[in-house]
Image (cartoon, helix red, strand yellow):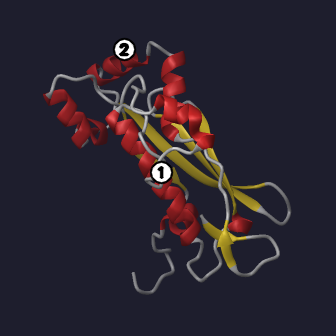
Amino acid sequence: SPGSKLRDTSRGKVVIPIQPPHELFAAEMAKNHDLPGRLRAAIADGELPPSYTTHPIVVERAAAGLEPPMPLGIYMDAVPYSLTDTVVGVWLYNVLTQRRQLVAVIRKRIVCVCGCLGWCTCCHFLHCLRWSFRSLAAGVHPERRHDGEEWGEADAQRAHLSGTPLGSCAILLQFKGDWAELCERLGYPTWQLGLR
């Protein structure tokens, strides 16, 4: 991702390690074989919000007689870890079980300072999330890297899993965070913006 390195005011390339949501989800499905049954019970009891039952993928799968997708969410919030620096934590959570798993930690000190207010760095990260959630919606491991390139030498395990089932499909139902994170990371207007 574009960003700024420590003690360097110019824009450069920074690496943000992440755990792709589809891999976290596949691991959770492998450990909890009762999740599909719990999901069907929650749907039958009306425990899920209308945003789930009216979601296009849920409607499409129900019409085709397929298993319903698991509802997932993303939670993003700033976490101070020293007197001078803060990180943005990004978690994946299962709406059904409320279990959270860490996706990424982004140091605020490394976000781009080109005048974009950090958007250059966040945009690439969000593209990676989109790639992962497309795989979740399809219910299979991705066949290429997030940037569209073929798998590299470091991706041997991912290349091996390419195109194999995740255990179920899932949808992004919720994206949570406080107002500051929604404005700073996702580009929403702040309360004080005169144009809005």
Tell me the number on the disc at residue 146: 1
Picture layout, residue 33 above or below residue 98? above
Q: Which mark is residue 89?
A: none
Q: Amino acid at mark 1?
A: His
Compared across the picture, whether 192 is left or right of 11 comes to left
- From the viewer's side, name the closer residue of 77 and 169: 169
Q: Nearest the camera: 152 or 63?
A: 152
Q: Which quarter of the figure is the N terminus placed in? A: bottom right
- Coordinates of residue 104 in the picture (x, y in percent): 63, 48
Q: Position of residue 90 (x, y in %)?
A: 59, 49
Label located before the other in sequence (1 or 2): 2
The residue furthest front is 153
Question: Can you tell which quarter of the image residue 6 is in?
Answer: bottom right
- Vertical position of residue 192 compared to residue 141: above or below: below
Q: Residues under labels 1 and 2: Cα distance?
A: 31 Å
Would you call the spot at circle 1 few (<14 residues within 10 Å), some (14-19), or many (20 or more)? some
Residue 82's x, y, as percent? 84, 58
Left or right of 167 on screen, residue 60: left
Q: Residue at x 15, y 27 (%)?
A: 64
Q: Is 6 on the left-hand or right-hand side of 172? A: right
> Which residue is drawn at the image coordinates 29% and 42% (left, top)?
51
Kind of residue at disc 2: Gly
